Image (spheres, grey):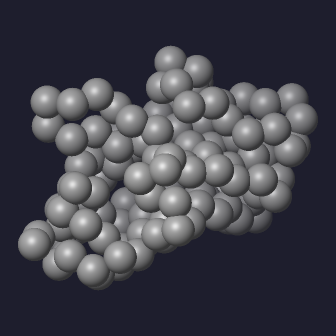
Amino acid sequence: VQLQASGGGTVQAGGSLRLSCAASGRTFRTYAMGWFRQAPGKERDFVAGISRSGGNTYYADSVKGRFTISRDNAKNTVYLQMNSLKPEDTAVYYCAAEFRRLPGVLPGRGHYEYDYWGQGTQVTVSS
């Protein structure tokens, strides 16, 4: 699976962005998906995860209520809608895929659990 993230940019605090992650191959629906972010000098942190079916999602506490993860298996794409952005959301955002046998199982929070990674897209939130 090859992943291509896009949609990053610069936005003022309080604004919104939608990230997309397009996957190649016909096996996209066998992977649970996650979004991570990494700020300069910091570790790569979990942001949001979604099951293979899209029916289950979960979020880091820092983004809960502001970010929404979704997926369209027909388009081989996962999205991250980011609202009410804050300067502390500034980071490179990565999408990642973790193989899951069952459609309703969520992906993990650890970056080491994932099988494939996209190249990252920069999000900058100005105050």
User: Which residue is rendered at x = 34% and y = 32% of the image?
Assistant: 44
Residue sitting at the far front: 61
From where the camera sits, is residue 118 visible? no
Image height check: is 42 above or below 85? above
50 above or below 18?
A: above
Q: Residue at x 46, y 69 (%)?
A: 66
Q: Is residue 96 left or right of residue 82?
A: right
Left or right of residue 92: residue 68: right
Front residue (pair 108, 76): 108
| Quadrant for the N terminus in the image | top right
* Residue 57 seen in the current view: yes
Where does residue 123 sit, x and y in percent of width and height? Answer: 24, 59
Where residue 107 appears, as percent x and y from the top left, is: 67, 35
Residue at (73% x, 39% y) in the render: 106
Counting the numbered discs, the total is 0
Residue 119 to residue 124: above or below:
above
Q: Position of residue 26 (x, y in %)?
A: 75, 45
Which residue is more in the foreground, 25 or 35?
Answer: 35
Q: Is residue 7 left or right of residue 14?
A: right
**Residue ranking furthest to the top:** 112
The residue that appears at 44% across and 58% down in the rendered structure is 63
Q: In the rendered view, tell whether residue 2 sits above or below residue 112.
A: below
In depth, the one of 22 and 48 nearer the eye is 48
How far across and how far down the image is residue 58, in percent? 64, 50
Which image quarter is the C terminus in?
bottom left
Query: Which residue is farthest left?
Result: 127
